[in-house]
Image (cartoon, rainbow, N blue to C red):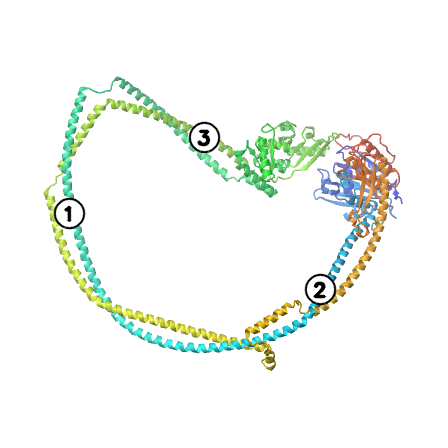
Amino acid sequence: AEAETYDGGYGVGSIRRVVVHNFMTYTDCWFEPGPRLNLLLGPNGSGKSTIVCALCIGLAASPKLLGRADNVKDFVKRGEASGWVEITLQTKPRPNASPFLHDGSSGDNEEGRKRKLKNVVKIRRTLLKDTNSSSWQLNGRNAGFREIQDLVKKLNVQIDNLCQFLPQDKVVSFAKLSPEALLKETEKAISMSGDKENSLFEIHEKLEGYHSEGTTLKQIIQTHQQKLEWLEKQKADIERDVEKVKRKKKLEDDKEWAEKKMKWVLYEEQKASYLQSKQALTTAKQLKLQKEKALKKLETAQRKDDSNCKKWGEKVKESDKQLRASQRKLRQKQESVEEQLEEVNKIETELNSWHRNKEKHERNVQSTREEIARLTEELHHWQEKEREGSSEFGPEHQRRLDAIKLEIQNIHQDQLGCRQQLNKNKKLRDRIQINLDQIVKKLGNFTDATQQRFEALASMNSTKAQKVFRAYQWIEQNKGRFRGRVFGPIIKEVNIPNPEHTVFLENQVPKYVWESFVACHKEDRDMLQQELNDRYKMQVTVMFSPQGMAPITYPHGHASEYEALHITHTLDEVFEAPLVVKNAMKDTASINTAYVGTRYTQRQIEESGRRNARAQWRETKIQNLWTPDHRFMRSTSRYDGFETLRTTSVRPPRLLQHGYDNDNERQNLERTKEGAERELAECNHAITSFLERNGELDQRLDALDEEKDKLLKLKQQIIRKIKSISATLKSKKKQLEKLLKSVFTEEKENELLDQKKVAIKKQVSTIRSCAECYGKYTDIHFQSMPIHMEYEGVKQRMQALVSEIRIARSEMEHAVNRVDEIDAIYKRDREKLKIRKEEAELTCTLNDESKSKFASFPSDKEELEEFIIVVSAEINGMMVTDPNVLEEYKDLEKSITTLRSKVSGEEEEMENFEKVRQAIHKSWLEPLEETVVILNVKFGKLFEDLGFVGEVRLRKAGEDGENDYSKFALELWVKFRAQDELCILNSTTQSGGERSVSTIMFLLSLSSLSQSPFRVIDEINQGMDPTNERLVFKKLVEEATSASSSPQCFLLTPKLLPELHYDDSVNVLNIFNGPVVDLSQQFNFL
């Protein structure tokens, strides 16, 4: 059935009117499309795609479908806080409702905008930039997002279906659709009317669910069947174990009675041990009494000898006291004898010294008299020579001597001036050194900016930063291998004096550039690539700028040319870096064509935008302009010369905010340090020069002094000789007079001899007294010897008795310990006996029945243990893992019966499920195949009219029982040249124009099957050759206007070929939007 149309042929869901306010490039505009084909013509950048965006945003679709922006705030016109989109759609007449909707919006052509529209619904979406949110109105009242979505869906509008809505940025996406996705999009397009639940798309989705469900059910049945087989096998295994149960039960009874008898055997064994320990305790107690008696006897003897030892000890003390007193007296006499001996020796030494001095004095007098005689004779000889005038000093020697004195005086003057300059430079050097030390100290207090910048890189990508730092270390360690200097990473080389410029530089320069290194020579660049990237796998960027140290050029003019716009710099001027680094940044980031403006520049641009005037900077060659908050860029299309303006917000810096806090001061200090070091070097050089000059003067002065001394010596040789001999002779005469005054007489010798005699007599007397004391000491010593011997005998007897007592006590302690040990064993055996008896009685009572049972088992402990081990081994060898095997056998039979019933039910359920699936499969596949046949005929006819070959094929996936419905696909097979083979349409084989022709022909093929209210196609004709474009346009007009049921269509394009075929129902909308439009004329324009 044909679709219903109203009010001039508009179908339900068709667009009647579009109004936008502060939306993207428009402040206010509206238009009313026709019911059939609407051509929107306008050059690039005029706002054609804005209409597509308005339809998407106004009909509750996601902004991501457009491929332009993710947030609704980005669709509000720049400089405005909010905007709105209003779309009026055709609906069916409602009972008891007014057929007219009045639109009272203000704007151009007020009469047309206030025209009443019949049977329409108006949707308005208001966009708020600050909160990135929106609000909805439906026919003037507030509405919710869900209500708008339900209305749009009810009107069969599917913005997310590329077969209905194909924006400019999604044209390529349509060609990239997989055959599987194309099938689903086609199902959606032809299933938008009628019963949604029974549409081909919904049935396809349901069949995919059935396939997944059926696969799961098959896996469950297979799992249950495997479990059933396993249970039956378990049952068979248990049947073999049942026969062993009785035998095992008998052995377990024998083992139990053998273990009971073992308890009584252990009791009898413990009883024998108890009696043995009781007997040993009695014997140990008797031995203890014997040892006690022997110890008491020895202790009595010890007390008696102890009294006798004390008596003799008193006698020894008294004897030792007398002996010590005699010894002290003898020692005093011996010390007196030694002192008197020392006095005699002292007098003897003094007497010998007197004799030696007397002999020495006599020798000195004789030698002095002989020296005086020799000197007197020599003096007479030289005096005679002086009177004869035999000197070698002549007039020429006197002239040379005068010249030397004058030259020495001049050298002294030069040295005085040299020392003054030397002292002056030393003081200056000390002052410079103090200042330099202070600068170095200040520099040491600054934070290392290089380290901060490496840390900033690490905060963004720690792995990459580590590789860059390793590369930096390698370069520092291998400086000698490079032909020239290697700079980098660039972030380390850059210094920005004004921190406000960091944001511009970081936003302009890509991140990889900051991590890069710059080589001055190509050979160094190649070596770094080989070492760092090929060998060490660091993957760092190494640049080489061909310009090297060439000055920076400005193709768009120097910043000083734009002072009127308050443009202060180009970006290469806002930072300091080696020229080779700047050239590398110029090549990679175009810093020489990026200009820096002020807030005045930004306000001027914003004011021009509010006045819809062209900003002044756009009249210049500038294409990239930075202001404190925005970046303005403009580009000119090579296609039609149209200028596009783009504005972005400035992101805050993340890398360059580190390490620049004190860089200015640090660099000033560095420069001051370099100046101080130069001054210090100059000062040291001057000091070295003055020292060398002074050394040269000293050498000359030494040579002159030496020559002067030789001449003076030659002149004064005889005079000095006479003076020297006269002085020596006078000294010797004085020495002789002094020697003659020293007299050695015999009275001094006799006095010393008398002192020696007196000392010897006194010594002899003291020796006699010492001998008497020694005799007394010897008598006392002999008298004390018997007392000491008796005392020692008593002590030895005491020591022997103490040893015997020690041994007796040790034996006594051993006997006591032995009694305690045996007593502990006795008590332990008694307790064990009690326990053994209780354990045995707990197992069974020893009566006739138990004795009869015990009789069949061995009575020996070892034999009984061996019997129990053998029986246990036989029990364990029976491999009956479950003692309740009979109960388990019954449980298995019950589980097998239940599981068989369950598997049977599941198989029946699977059979019914498969019947339902096949019925649904048939209800889906048959109409789908019919639809594909219709599409194929239509698609092939359209391609044939264009001179090409095209087919639409349905690719199935397996037979009915094994269908994977997610693999069903719709394939477009095309051939554009006679020599080619038919091949599937894809994004790589065909050209862009061929893909565009295929896309538009497929969409036209769908038009007879799809009940979509409208279609949007943006710039589909771009890339077509003129012939194809003319044929495609003709077909598009024919299909869009051939019947009253044809859906509304929007085709957006920047240009069309001349003399195309048009129909009366084609509505052409020309967009006049741009800075050169004459607004004084009134047009019904967009």
Residue located beneath label 1 in the image: 348
Which residue corresponds to mark 2? 234
Q: Quadrant of residue 292?
A: bottom left
Image quarter (top left, top right, bottom left or bottom right) of the C terminus: top right
Residue 49 in the image: x percent, y percent? 77, 37
Q: Amino acid at mark 2?
A: Gln
Q: Earlier in the sequence, mark 2 or mark 3?
A: 2
In the drawing, does residue 848 fall left or right of residue 684?
Answer: right
Q: Are marks 3 and 1 in contact (CB under 8 Å)?
A: no
Disc 2 or 1, which lies upstream in sequence?
Answer: 2
Instruction: Please say if 389 is above or below 196.
Output: above
Callout 3, which amino acid? Ala
Q: Position of residue 742 (x, y in %)?
A: 14, 38
Nearest the viewer among 271 and 131 is 271
Is residue 118 visible in this depiction of the protein?
A: no
Which element carries disc 1, helix, strand or loop?
helix
Residue tagged 3:
681
Residue 184 vs residue 860: left or right?
Answer: right
**Distance of label 3 from label 1 (alpha carbons):** 78 Å
Dot placed on the residue nearer the N-terminal end, 3 or 1: 1
The picture places residue 406, in percent across and down from the top left corner, at 31, 21
